[in-house]
Image (tube, coloured by chain):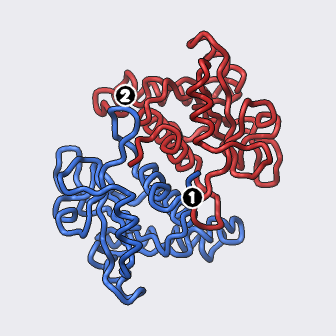
Chain colours: A blue, B red
């Protein structure tokens, strides 16, 4: 799973770069670890932001935090920081030996979207690793969504409101895709 | 849904009171609104903490924040602050006219737990409103869990790790209980 901080939209659909937040790192790392993902990537072109994220991760992975809280260390162990979606894709390809099957998530309806069940079936039948892109801000830019292999349908709750936090959306998505439901 | 800050456990199973956090208010309010809940309660016995939560909610509900961000206002509209689980239960009873069917959540296995499907069926057949208790820190104290109508089974992912954030756990739970899954 990759959390993308650029290119994403702001509320007026302009292309922006959002700031990395500490809680996005931790919450989505813990969800990724819970559902057994091979990795979690933070994507931002801003070098100072990548350095900040690396320092936070380092604190919990091998610094004082690791001794204090082992379950945070376990969650942050597979977290990586990349400068672009292309770099994230390339890292998955290098680690796994094949180009990732890349999936975009969005809170908007599009004609080309697939559901979680269909995606799980397709991914299981493919030898390629799955890379799921999550957008921060007001969502992934069209230039990203238009170039992926599949676009997931938005998470629809019981009500006419879909402004979940990206942390909540990531958790629900992982549970729908990989959870052991009774 | 109620987010309980006391009585909860710390990592050594002592009873503590945790601090209200801004992001717990927003994330779980947004998830609650997405899944059409009638309300979201913040529970803490600490008066200064209840005042803080009320100020944050007021900012987005009727202050500067309301004009700036209508989807936050919508999410925070039904949020209430209560001093205890008993006060939260009493508020639901007053609003709905009957005692809530109260459900505890926990990350630990217990012999008396039910799954989400069973709970949905049971709640749908009951005229009583549902009140779902989420624990902060290391989870709801036994004195709370031992007194509810039902205890939900822990959320199990694909891996042997269940340290989801309470924000992520709330989102997954609401989706399992009330989501429109394909």
- Numbered disc 2: what chain? B
Residue in the foreground of this view, choosing between B24 and B101: B101
- Numbered disc 1: what chain? A
Which residue lies at the image location 59% right of the left edge and 18% below the top edge?
B127
The residue indicated by pointer 1 is A180
Which residue lies at the image location 39% right of the left edge and 60% below the top edge?
A20
Which residue lies at the image location 59% right of the left edge and 55% below the top edge?
B164
Which residue lies at the image location 37% right of the left edge and 33% below the top edge?
B72
Q: Residues within 10 Å of mark 2 (few under 14, many from 20)?
A: some
Q: Quadrant of residue A112?
A: bottom left
* Left or right of A150 on screen, residue B170: right
Q: Position of residue B4 (x, y in %)?
A: 66, 35
Residue in the foreground of this view, choosing between A108 and A153: A153
* Left or right of A72 on screen, residue B141: right
* Left or right of B48 on screen, residue B147: right
Label drawn at residue B74: 2
Q: Position of residue B107 (x, y in %)?
A: 69, 51
Q: Position of residue A42 (x, y in %)?
A: 40, 68
Q: Select label 2 or label 1 by which is in front.
A: 1
Residue in the foreground of this view, choosing between B131 and A126: A126
**Quarter the N terminus of chain A occupies:** bottom left
């Amino acid at each position: 799973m990759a959390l993308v901080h650029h290119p994403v939209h702001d509320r007026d659909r302009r292309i922006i770069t959002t700031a990395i937040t500490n809680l996005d790192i931790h919450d989505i790392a813990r969800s990724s670890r819970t559902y057994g993902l091979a990795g979690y990537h933070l994507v931002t072109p801003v070098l100072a932001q990548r350095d900040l994220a690396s320092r936070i991760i380092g604190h919990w992975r091998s610094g004082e935090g690791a001794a204090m809280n082992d379950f945070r260390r376990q969650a942050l162990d597979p977290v990586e920081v990349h400068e672009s979606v292309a770099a994230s894709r390339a890292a998955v390809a290098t680690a796994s030996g094949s180009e990732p099957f890349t999936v975009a998530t969005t809170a908007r309806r599009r004609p080309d979207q697939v559901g979680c069940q269909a995606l799980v079936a397709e991914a299981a039948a493919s030898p390629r690793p799955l890379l799921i892109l999550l957008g921060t801000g007001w969502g992934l830019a069209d230039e990203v969504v238009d170039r992926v292999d599949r676009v997931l349908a938005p998470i629809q709750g019981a009500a006419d409101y879909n402004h979940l936090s990206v942390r909540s959306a990531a958790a629900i998505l992982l549970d729908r895709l990989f959870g052991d439901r009774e």
